[in-house]
Image: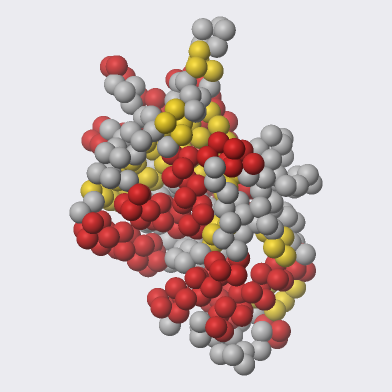
Amino acid sequence: MTNVCLNGKTVLVTGDAGFIGSGLVSKLMDKAENIKIIGVDNMNDYYDVKIKEWRLAENLKKAKEKKCAYIFTKGDISDKETVKSLFENHRPDVVVNLAAQAGVRYSLTNPDAYIKSNIIGFYNILEACKNSYKNGEKGVEHLVFASSSSVYGSNEKIPYSTDDMTDSPVSLYAATKKSNELMAHAYAKLYNIPATGLRFFTVYGPAGRPDMAYFSFTQKLIRGENIEIFNYGNCRRDFTYIDDIVEGIIRVMTGAPEKKTGKDGLPVPPFAVYNIGNSSPENLLDFVDILQSELVRAKVLDENYDFESHKKLVPMQAGDVPVTYADTSALERDFGFKPSTPLKEGLRKFAEWYKAVYC
């Protein structure tokens, strides 16, 4: 592993107005000295643009207060010229690709969005990383990119290990994320680009995505609507708090896979994949119980709210899996880090944030 110091470096974060991207930008301002952060996001309306604008505004305000160099560009990584311009104008040392079309269920009805963002967009990033080495330039020291626990499909072996086979995706979203890993591996082999994929497990927390269960449940309950709990409540999810995800990303950013030459005289792909999950899957019904208690505690909902009448148990939906469970031993071994925020603590912070921002 090659050490990558972030102090004084230029870091490109794609999807920087997104949930994870905005959290990463904020934390990089706190942890790295003299860092220059270049952000790009297309600000699409897959979910309420206002929350993306809120995240972006918070980080631009923070950058001004801390006198940190943070430059935001509204653009789409599926546009090759946009990506080319970002690399030529800023010459990033580290690239963190978090821009992607997320969501398993949305991929059933809007597959084009996944091919455009997750395949074409990522290809443009890889090409730009490759071209950063031209004319003897130092180029990109480390490409870190978002994968997903969805690549494990309906794997019955738990916890999920990065050594497991991931050749049977059950959604187009999962297939695009597996494709990202394969594409990055090929470019690592062909062009010696140090690349690391991160398989995120059900990320949640303040300023999250409104399409995620904890957020959408909250909004529906406030409106007096029913919440649907899939697989009759028998699903289990490895919920991972946003701060743990961001800490994991930053640690991985600083440790790039080492460049080596094989016996054939060609590069051994400087490539790695890690799980980032809490390693403690929770039953969905227990999750809902904790969420509702924290919403009451934060005074988002009245203490006499009739939760039972608003719960609806429904069958599994296409593309979903019954359980996600991360084996994080490789992350612990290589970076000395393991996500550990308890679900109750994380949902409490979400409920308090929701009360402050929405109520």
- Tell whether 319 sits left or right of 15: right
Residue sitting farthest toward the front: 336
Instruction: Give 161 or 234, whichever is nearer the viewer.
Output: 161
Residue sitting farthest toward the top: 264
Q: Residue at x 70, y 67 (%)?
A: 284
Residue sitting farthest toward the bottom: 304
Q: Residue at x 42, y 37 (%)?
A: 254
Asked whether residue 19 appears in the rendered view, the answer is: yes
Residue 48: quarter of image: bottom left
Residue 343's x, y, as percent? 61, 65
Instruction: Give 125 or 163, whichever is nearer the viewer.
Output: 163
Q: Residue at x 69, y 63 (%)?
A: 282
- Tell whether 73 sits left or right of 115: left
Residue 102's x, y, as percent? 53, 53
Instruction: Give 209 or 35, whichever is nearer the viewer.
Output: 35
Residue 26's x, y, as percent? 35, 55
Q: Quadrant of the C terminus?
A: bottom left
